[in-house]
């Protein structure tokens, strides 16, 4: 669970269609947990990764009047740049445990970096506008492999579901 915070702007083309874009600080991440037996030893790995991106969505937005509220649908691309991140890992081999927290190394070198800096994908959302307040649901579908590993069988892509609450400073 994370958050997004930032500013968006909407350019009205007609009463129904507009273009919306923004610059936001977005938190993302994942948890990983696996355990099993390797060569007669019990091995357990737990990993929590917290990532922070500058996130730039640009979308076409259609708005439909429902009376006391407006329904909106939006679709468009996003790009994001990884800024800071943290990896917390706990490893247990039989009865010996170790844990460590390290900063994410951003870049494309599989020998020294964890994740690629740039991410990109598609954003789709829907919601309701009540005057100057919007409440919605969005989904980001990453299409860029963000893993620095070059193994062709391994790929990491951001996938996010978000609940949004927006306040309009001007209409």
Image (spheres, grey):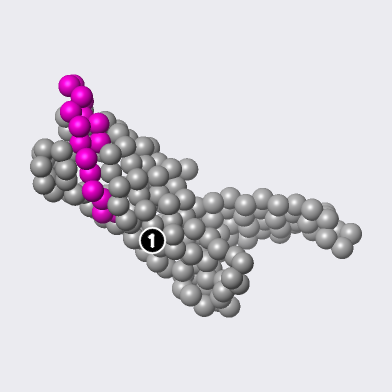
In screen coordinates, is 105 left or right of 54?
Answer: right
Name the residue that disc number 1 marks.
Answer: 120
Q: Closest to the observer: 27 or 75?
A: 75
Position in image of residue 4 (x %, y %): 35, 47
Q: Pinpoint residue 88: horizontal percent, then vertical percent.
A: 59, 57
Left or right of residue 69: residue 46: right
Percent position of residue 83, x then y: 39, 63
Residue 165 appears at what percent x and percent y?
A: 30, 36
Asked if residue 132 can be seen in this view, the reply is yes
Residue 8 can be seen in this image: no
Q: Nearer the viewer, residue 79 or 117?
A: 79
Is residue 70 within the magenta segment?
yes
Q: Secondary structure at mark 1?
A: strand
Residue bounds of the magenta highlight:
57-72
Q: Residue at x 32, y 56 (%)?
A: 77
In the figure, residue 153 lies in which quadrant? bottom right
Is residue 167 shown in magenta?
no
**Residue positioned 43% across, 52% down in the render:** 141
Which residue occupies 67% across, 50% down?
Answer: 33
In the image: residue 52, left or right of residue 100: left
């Amino acid at each position: 669970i994370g958050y997004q915070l930032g500013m968006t702007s909407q350019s009205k083309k007609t009463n129904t269609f507009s273009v919306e874009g923004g610059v936001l600080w977005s938190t993302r991440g994942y948890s990983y947990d696996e355990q099993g037996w390797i060569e007669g030893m019990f091995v357990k790995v737990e990993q929590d990764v917290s990532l922070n991106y500058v996130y730039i969505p640009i979308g076409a937005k259609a708005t439909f009047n429902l009376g006391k509220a407006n329904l909106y649908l939006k679709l468009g691309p996003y790009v994001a740049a990884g800024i800071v991140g943290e990896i917390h890992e706990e490893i247990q081999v039989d009865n010996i445990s170790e844990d460590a927290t390290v900063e994410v190394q951003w870049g494309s070198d599989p020998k020294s970096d964890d994740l690629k800096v740039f991410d990109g994908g598609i954003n789709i959302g829907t919601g309701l506008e009540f005057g100057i307040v919007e409440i919605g649901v969005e989904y980001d579908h990453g299409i860029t492999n963000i893993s620095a590993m070059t193994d062709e069988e391994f790929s990491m892509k951001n996938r996010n579901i978000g609940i949004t609450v927006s306040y309009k400073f001007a209409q």
